[in-house]
Amino acid sequence: MSEKSVMEKDTCAVKDTVAREIACLKKLEELLATAPLSHVLDLMQQTQGRIIFTGMGKSGIVAKKIVASLASTGTPAFFVHPAEASHGDLGMISSQDMVVAISNSGESKELADILNYCKRFGITLVGITKNADSTLAKYADCVLPLPNMPEADPLGLAPTSSTTATLVLGDVLTVALMNRKQFTKQDFQVRHPGGKLGAVLQRVKDIMHTGDEIPLLSENTPIPTILVEMSNKRLGCVGFTNEKGELTGIFTDGDLRRKMSPALFNQTGADVMTKNPKNVSGEMMAAEALHFMNEKKITTLFVTVENKPVGIIHIHDLLKLGL
């Protein structure tokens, strides 16, 4: 087979697979328009315990992703493997929990013990399946339908369209619960402290220098003492306060170079400081602070509460986060 023929077949596979999966998702949208979605969301939101997902094979893999999405967006959830459940892990499920079982056919034999356990102890059970007449659907208190459509592979057998539809249904549940709970960026950051995402969502108060690390002196301090403070704190500046403890000015290493002269050493902070320095709230997002510093062409920024300094950040602190 020529290289051109191979490329043509690949292109055809791309178009055909994507088209079939899109058609399956459009069918899912139609089904959810009349499905008891709001009722399931009510059950999930009202659950006193956790949302437990279970599923075998590819359904189980998708279930784990849904669990991860829910847990990271404020809905306690975890995955129980149906085979392990039959060998002791059923004890992980309490009467306060809710179980969501996923099976495309609704006839996964490995789910039998979990289904019986839910019935025996009155645990709310939601089924996700394409077969409304399946064992899973009959056991479930509520069923969310999957499209009964062919898979996207040439044989119509490999889980492709069905797993995509299940994944999107999980995203629907996650996003809808986020909306109901009014989940914020700050809430998201608490659950994602690591990596680039955690860095982007960090607030200024999480990374600012505080206490003795802040280069801060009275505005009446003589220049020699100011230079020692600037050198010791290594942030390239010193802030000044008045008798009320309010931030009144700043003196930077750039100011030092511009004002250097023999007369400088006879002056005080009040004589050389730049008055009313830029300052921000500790609640500002780190990414916003970096944008602000770039816009104002400054490298340090005091953090204040009612104009009283509580911290300071340097642009290097922000760049270290990878912003």
Image: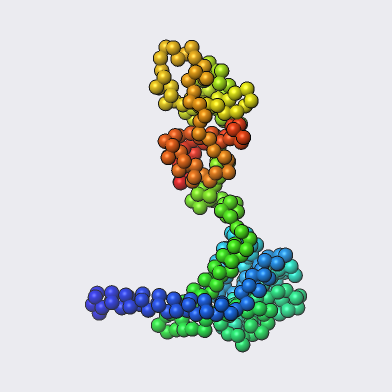
Image vertical order of residue 75 relative to residue 9, above or below: above
Q: Nearer the viewer, residue 251 or 109?
A: 251
Relative image position of residue 56 (x, y in whole percent): 58, 76
The residue at the point 57 percent across, 28 percent down is 247
Q: Let me know if residue 103 appears in the view.
A: no
Rendering colour mode: rainbow
**Split into 4 quadrants, where in the image is the N terminus?**
bottom left
Look at the image and tell me whether residue 266 can be seen.
yes
Q: Quadrant of residue 220?
A: top right
At 53% from the left and 35% from the top, the residue drawn is 279
Q: Is residue 196 above or below residue 209?
A: below
Q: Considering only vertical position in the picture, is 189 above or below 45?
A: above
Residue 144, image x, y percentages: 60, 78
Q: In the rendered view, would you say 144 is above or below 318?
A: below
Q: Position of residue 38 (x, y in %)?
A: 63, 72
Q: Position of residue 264 (x, y in %)?
A: 45, 15
82 on left or right of 148: right
Looking at the rendered structure, the number of numbered marks drawn on it comes to 0
User: What residue appears at the point 47 percent right and 28 percent down from the top-left corner?
Assistant: 236
The quadrant holding residue 100 is bottom right
Q: Residue furthest bottom?
A: 133
In which quadrant of the rendered view does residue 49 lie?
bottom right
